[in-house]
């Protein structure tokens, strides 16, 4: 999986205790429109969901095995060591069934537990470099670690030189 780029708002949200990254429901939605680091929320009241404030990146359409809001990152956990925060969780696999999914290029991680349904806080996004379409029966797994098991992204929250 490509490296995650954290949204600028996520750093501010950590400082104001907007997230409980050990307990909140984290979702990974797919879009083919580039998010912007200045985006601040995901509006889940719209269909499809929209990453808002700067990019207005629309989620891909639900269907053929992809559900609105994407896949849930289960068993998420947050830890910190030597000034670097680490967010881990189970991998997310999406399989096309009965048709194709996509195209998509970006995976957006957001918190589906905080804010209102119109103001879910953003965390980070990954860029796959080019558009991907899953044909019927094909799968993609987000978050394989080096052993191929669980999603594991290190998100530096604050660096002090």
Image (cartoon, helix red, strand yellow):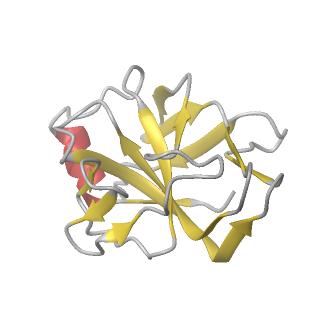
Residue found 65% across the figure and 52% down from its top: 64
Task: Examine the rendered structure and indicate whether residue 53 appears above or below residue 161.
Answer: below
Along the viewing direction, whichever of 42 and 102 lies nearer the viewer? 102
Q: How many labels does the image show?
A: 0
Q: Which residue lies furthest to the front in this view?
A: 98
Asked if residue 47 lies left or right of residue 135, the reply is left
In what quadrant of the picture does the C terminus appear? bottom left
* Residue 70, horizontal then vertical, whole percent: 51, 46
Relative depth, front residue between 159 and 138 = 138
The answer to whether residue 40 is above or below residue 105 is: above
The residue located at (64%, 77%) in the rendering is 131
Where on the picture, by quarter, is residue 113?
A: top left
Classify residue 145 as left or right of residue 19.
right
Image location of residue 69, percent across then percent down: 43, 46
Judge left or right: residue 149 versus residue 72.
right
Residue 32, above or below 23: below
Taking the spot 54% from the left edge, 66% from the top edge, the residue there is: 106
- Left or right: residue 49 compared with residue 80: left
Q: In terms of depth relative to the viewer, which is nearer, 56 or 110?
A: 56
Q: In which quarter of the image is the N terminus?
A: bottom right
Q: Which residue lies furthest to the bottom in this view?
A: 130
Q: Residue 57, position in %: x, y?
A: 36, 70
Res. 43 in view: yes
Nearest to the observer: residue 109 or residue 158:
109
Q: Is residue 127 visible?
A: no
């Amino acid at each position: 999986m490509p490296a995650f780029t954290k949204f600028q708002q996520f750093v501010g949200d950590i400082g104001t205790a907007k997230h409980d990254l050990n307990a909140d429901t984290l979702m990974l939605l797919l879009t083919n429109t580039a998010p912007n680091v200045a985006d601040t929320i995901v509006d889940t009241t719209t269909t499809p969901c929209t990453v808002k404030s700067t990019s207005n990146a629309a989620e891909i359409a639900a269907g053929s095995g992809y559900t609105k809001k994407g896949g849930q990152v289960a068993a998420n956990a947050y830890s910190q060591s030597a000034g670097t925060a680490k967010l881990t969780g189970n991998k997310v696999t999406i399989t096309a069934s009965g048709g194709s999914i996509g195209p998509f290029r970006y995976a957006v991680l957001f918190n589906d537990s905080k804010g209102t349904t119109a103001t879910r806080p953003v965390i980070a996004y990954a860029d796959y470099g080019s558009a991907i379409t899953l044909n019927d029966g094909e799968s993609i797994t987000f978050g394989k670690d080096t052993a191929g098991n669980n999603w594991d992204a290190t998100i530096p929250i604050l660096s002090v030189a």
